[in-house]
Image (cartoon, helix red, strand yellow):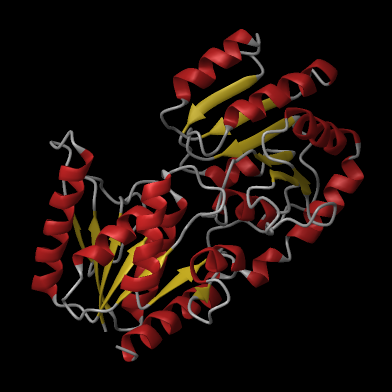
Amino acid sequence: MKLVIVITGMSFGGAERVTAYVSNYLIQQGTSVTILALNKTEPAYALDPTIEYQYFDASTYSNRLSRDLSLMMSLRKTIGKIQPDLVLGMMSYSGTLAAFSCIGTRIPVILSERNDPHTSIAFNTLEKHIIKFAYRYLAKTAIFQTQGAKEYYYGNQGKGWIIPNPLYLEEIPLPMQSPPNTRRIISAGRLSKQKNYALLIRAFAKVHSLHPDYSLVIYGEGPERKMLETLIEELRLPDAIRLPGIEADIFSQLQRGELFVLSSLYEGMPNALIEAMAMGLPVITTDYSDGRGTIVSHQENGLLVPREDVEALSNAIIYMIEHPSEAWTMGRRATAIRELLDSKRICSLWADALRETMSAR
C-alpha cells in the first residue's frame, strides 16, 4: 500500500505524535508512507528514514482564502505525482483541504478527527459546515477517538472507525510504587486557549491559600504564555507557579508530581492525561467532552469537574491533597489504561482501517 498523510504540521502535539508512530508501524508492515505538512515544520518525533516528509509554506499569503487555495493546489499537484492508494487527512483543517484537493482523482480519502467537534472552538459556523461536508460527502470513511465524535459527523450510520489514542509503553515508566510526596502539581500541553490554563492558575491560587507548600508546574509552549505570566504576577504567585516550557523528558517530571491536572475546554483523547494515568499519577480533568464521556470515570480512576468552573477545580485539587490515600487508590486504578491503549494494539487497528478503506475503493 502507498499512503499519503496530510497534516497541519509535525511539531510537538498529540496528533503529530500519533502520525509519527502509526507511520513507523505501517512502514514495518510494508506500507510506503509520505507525510505532507501544511506548515514549515521539522518533525518533533522520530520518523523511520524511509518515510518521505515534505512541507509547504503558505506563510506569504495574508489572506486566508488565498492561502487555502494555494495549499490545495500544492496538495493536488504533489498527490497527483505520488499516485497513492489512499490519502489520510489528520485533523479537521488539514483533512478538509486534503479531501477537496482529491476531488476527481479517484484516490480514496480517509479523515481523522483529533478533537471533540461538539465542544471545539477552533472553527466558526461556516467552517464547521465545510468540514462536515468533507467528512460526509468527500471521504470514504473516517477515524474518530470517541463515539460522540463519530455521531457528530455520521449520526447513527455505521460509517466510521473508533480508535483511541495509543500509549507507547516502551517509553513510559512503570507505574509508581509509592506516592512521591513532592507537593508538586503538574500539567502539560500547548499554552493555548484550548488548554485553558488560566482556569487552572486561578483554581491553584485558591488551593495555595490553604496549602502554601504546594507548587504548580505547567510544561509546554504557545501563544498564551505572556497572558499566563501576567496572570501569575497579578495573583502574586511567581514563586509557586512555573512555566518552564517544553520538557523533552516529561515522564521524569511526571514521576516527581503528586497530581496531574487537565483544564481543557475541549479535547479528543488527551495524550498527556492518559500518560499520567499509565504511570499511576492521580488525575483531575475537566469534562472536555461536555458529558459525552471522558477517559476518566469520576471517583474511580480520577476526578471529573465541569469545564470553566474555578471553584469545582480548586475543590477537586484540595480534595486530592487532603485525601492522599483515596487519591493513590484512584491512581492505581488508572493504570489499567496501559493494557487498553497499548500502542501495538492501537496501531494494528489503524492498519486494519486503512487497508479496509483502500480495498473498498
Q: Is residue 52 above or below residue 214?
A: below
Q: Quadrant of residue 257?
A: top right
Image coordinates of residue 319 in percent, x first then y, are 87, 36
Q: Is residue 22 above or below residue 45?
A: below
Q: Is residue 3 visible?
A: yes
Task: Give the mark count.
Answer: 0
The quadrant holding residue 355 is bottom left
Does 257 appear above or below 267? above
Residue name at image x 73 percent, y 41 percent: 306
Which is more toward the observer, 130 or 302? 130
Q: Tell me if 277 is positioned left or right of 39 in this view.
A: right
Quadrant location, the C terminus:
bottom left
**Image position, residue 30 (x, y; %):** 30, 84
| Left or right of 257, for residue 238 | left
Q: Residue at x 63, y 43 (%)?
A: 254
The percent position of residue 165, horizontal first and vertical second, equals 54, 63
* In the rendered image, the vertical position of residue 72 relative to residue 235, given as above or below: below
Where residue 27 appears, as percent x and y from the top left, is 31, 76
Q: Say which residue appears at 50% left-offset and 54% top-offset.
A: 115
Is residue 260 toward the left or the right of residue 231 in the image?
right
